[in-house]
Image (spheres, helix red, strand yellow):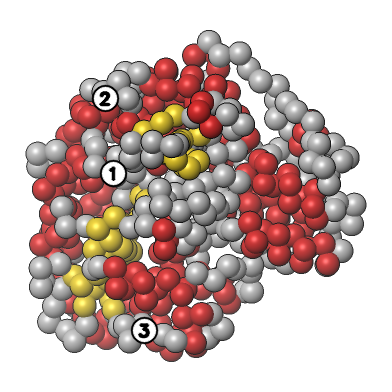
Amino acid sequence: MRFPYGLADFATLISEDYFYVDRTDRIPLIENAGRQLLFLRPRRFGKSLWLSTLENYYDLAKAGDFERLFGKLKIGQNPTPLHNRYFILKLNFSVVDPSGDRDAIRRALFDHLNVRITDVIGRYAEWLGDRVCVLPDNGIASFQSLISVVSQTPYKLYLLIDEYDNFANEVMISRERGKPRYQELVEGEGIIKTFFKAVKDGAEGRGVDRVFITGVSPVVLSDMTSGYNVVKILSHRPEYDDLLGFTADEIQATLEQIAASGMMPTIPVPEALYLIRTFYNGYCFSPRSAVQVYNPTLALYFLEALAQDGEYPAKMLDDNLAMDRNHIQYVARLPHGSTLITQALAADAERPESAILIDQLADRFGVEMMLNTPKDQTFLASLLYYFGVLTIAGRNKLGQLRLTIPNLVVRKLYQDFRSIFSIKRVDTLEYTDYVTHDVNTHSRGCF
């Protein structure tokens, strides 16, 4: 089995027969959900691959590849009328350089817009000709020129934006002029707010028909206020719980396939299943559902090691997830943040009453609210949930949501900041310390 660890290109994944869990049956749901949508999930949770899936499905220029790419998938058996009916403009804000002052970030954003718009002009030259004006010093004007030309064709634009809040978040959590520089980008006539005002304007009959945006949290969106107040957030709806990530049944079936191939001869499937569940499972994203999913990056990291080497990975914490320590550190610096981190580490899965309790997840809160958070710390707890370092663990008898650390790998990220919060360190987490021989009784040792 070939596992697409680090691969977010749908066409390559399908064409080269990589491991793929089919979620294309959700495409009709998303079409019916609305025309301007936002879907939030933590870092490295498969957002880019999902956008690539939408890109390939709707791309006018890829109509001839539809059967090859989607014919064997769920949506290929019953496609919607909108497949291959759009010009696609795909932006990725994670590649916009967040360093420098406001003007430097503005230039970085304009450069990204112009590069992607130039790509669109080349791919759709048959329909767009040479009528789009790309202005080197004003990427937003280039975008407006593009949608003006698009509106004169029989087709419309589908705008895909990956990690919409990435570079703004990087500015926000930086120690150097973080808050002032962040506010310059998102408030008043800040460049991010101005761009999304242009998107909103373009969707009012001026060429933009659909928008699908991914990100980590709603903070940037909330701070833009009227800049883009037309988007619908899908993140908490139970029908999209497992849109990204793998279910326990899918993980078990994959482990059984690896075992059947003879690639893990000394490792029983129940042991591998218990280990991956203990270290990586635990993410629940909907307050109305109990569905838990595995972070796909962590799961693929683990499965690839088994399939290639026949043994567990040397380190259970994938370095790609280690950057989430920065998010924990950022929350710790906010008012009441260190108290919340201490409470999260002290919570015990065997004692539900020890979990962090909130009435509901906050989905409209900005930096000012976090800096002036009330004593119940709803905003900070919600932010840790969006970052993927807290997750939903059900409700108590009063209907309050219980938030806990999802798994041992995330707990390790908290422990790495133990010296900041004067928290005693728990022993280093490695699978060799945790797994014992008694798989059937789950007597696995402790840390």
Which amino acid is tagged 2? Thr
Residue 296 is drawn in which quadrant?
Answer: bottom right
Q: Which quadrant holds the C terminus?
A: top right
Q: How many marks?
A: 3
Q: Residues within 10 Å of mark 1 (few under 14, many from 20)?
A: some
Residue 198 seen:
yes
- Residue drawn 65% across and 61% down? 249
Q: In what element is the residue under mark 1?
A: loop
In the orientation shown, which residue stands out farthest toward the front?
A: 397
How far from the left and from the top, in percent, is residue 361? 34, 41
- Earlier along the polypeptide chain: callout 2 or callout 3? 3
Coordinates of residue 437 in the picture (x, y in percent): 88, 40
Q: Amino acid at mark 3?
A: Thr
Chain-order first, disc 2 or disc 1: 1
Residue 411 seen in the current view: no
Labelled pair 3, 1 in contact (Cβ < 8 Å)? no
Image position of 159 (left or right of 70) = left
Q: From the image, tell me which residue sits under label 1.
A: 363
Relative image position of residue 154 (x, y in whole percent): 18, 86
The secondary structure type at the circle numbered 3 is loop
Mark 2 vs 3: CB contact within 8 A: no
Query: Would residue 80 appear left or right of 253 to someone viewing this image?
Result: left
Q: Mark 2 — residue?
A: 373
On the image, numbered disc 3 is attached to which residue?
A: 80
| Quarter of the rendering occupied by the N terminus | bottom right
